Image (cartoon, grey):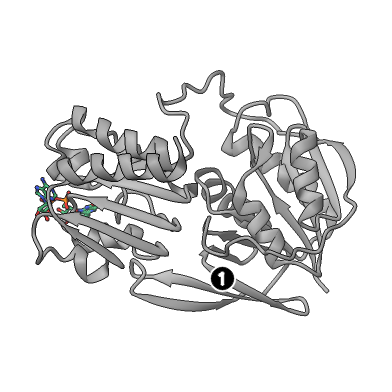
Amino acid sequence: MAKILVFTELHGTHVKGVTLEILGKLSGHTVEIATIGKFPTEAATELAKFGAAKIHSLAGANLDKYSPEGYSNALHGFISKGAYDYVFAGATSLGKDLLPRLATKFDAGMASEVTNFTMEGDKFFGTRPLFAGKCFAKVELSGPKPHFVTVRPNALGLNPNPTSGAAAASDSTVDAGAMKAIIQEILKGASEKLDLTEANIIVSGGRAMKEAANFKILDELANVIGATVGASRAAVDSGFAPHAMQVGQTGKTVAPTLYIACGISGAIQHLAGMRTSKVIVAINTDPDAPIFTKADYGIVGDLFQIVPLLTQEFKNLLGK
Ligand SMILES: Cc1cc2nc3c(=O)[nH]c(=O)nc-3n(C[C@H](O)[C@H](O)[C@H](O)COP(=O)(O)OP(=O)(O)OC[C@H]3O[C@@H](n4cnc5c(N)ncnc54)[C@H](O)[C@@H]3O)c2cc1C
């Protein structure tokens, strides 16, 4: 049986959903959790429910804000003492930045952005999309341990029957080392919405939105169904939306349960970022738009009529 550490980030008083997905998949193994900062009670309870054996809260000077250098130094020291076989994290913006740095420090193997995996004894077998999701590679890790794995959010889903455990809590001091740059302040974007890569529902707009102000109708739909709003590159390049909202090859890769594409043609570079969505709905005036070949449900029509109708229908349905 492998000794596994899952590094997690907090989202308010909760852990990010991908941590629970990973824990659910590791059901039956001894899994410890670590974060930099203190776990709120809600987060600790969630983790215990999903089978965490031990929860480490790590603290140290200059670690109150994410720093690639400080976090990787601090975790390198902590992980070295724990004799872990595997260190997992979500393939979030932070996880994708941090884990490769750690793998390099340990001169160890890493599987990035796996969408599924199995553990056979202490051996890891992962699946990761290649060439913008056109094919899948099976990944095994060899060489010195610990090995590092990032898991794409929303890819595994939550285990409905996780092994629940009584998680022991542990506070440790870690050392960020001699940092060349200390982050003083992080200015957040205007949106407090969930990052696209972690969103369970996404409503995206394309060039057909015509102007930035028209994204309001997507925001209204998103508010009713609890979605995050994305955009195609054409919409971003036209100045309708910031780059942080771009889905696709040169934007974010997303895997929500539901992806609603509004006025997006379905170019290969856009599909590269959202083709692993579980259900795709496309709204487009052109019945021959390529997006319809990938959509589970297609609506041929004008998004400026259809999106408000959908918003109203969802309001009625959900009693909002
Ligand atoms: C190297 C490279 C990287 C790229 N990376 C990305 C990327 O990361 N993400 C990305 O999205 N693209 C990317 N692109 C660009 C990509 O090739 C497409 O140009 C882009 O996705 C098109 O965006 P769009 O679908 O919004 O616009 P269009 O292709 O112009 O499509 C607009 C669609 O809206 C429909 N429409 C028009 N009016 C309405 C209406 N009123 N109601 C409903 N439908 C309507 C039209 O029928 C059409 O299908 C990349 C390109 C390159 C070369």
Residue toward you, 275 or 79: 275
Query: Within the image, what quadrant is residue 87 found in?
Result: bottom right
Figure label count = 1
Task: Give me the residue at 58% from left, 50% from top.
Answer: 101
Left or right of 69: which side holds 191? Answer: left
Can residue 260 be seen here? The reply is yes
Q: Is residue 16 above or below residue 188?
A: below
Residue toward you, 195 or 158: 158
Label 1 element class: strand
Left or right of 291: which side holds 115? Answer: right
Give the residue pinned by disc 1: 116
Task: Give me the residue at 61% from left, 67% from top.
Answer: 109
- Give the image location of residue 172, x and y in percent: 86, 37
Task: Give me the residue at 57% from left, 48% from top.
Answer: 95
- Give the image location of residue 171, x and y in percent: 87, 36
Query: Within the image, what quadrant is residue 178 found in?
Result: top right
- Give the image location of residue 239, x and y in percent: 18, 32
Q: Which corner quadrant holds the N terminus?
A: bottom right
- Give the image location of residue 9, x and y in percent: 64, 41
Badge 1: residue crowd in 10 Å (few <14, some 14–19, many ≥20): some
Can residue 87 be seen here? The reply is no
Residue toward you, 310 or 104: 310
Residue toward you, 43 or 136: 43
Q: What amino acid does circle 1 point to?
A: Asn
Q: Which corner quadrant holds the C terminus?
A: top left
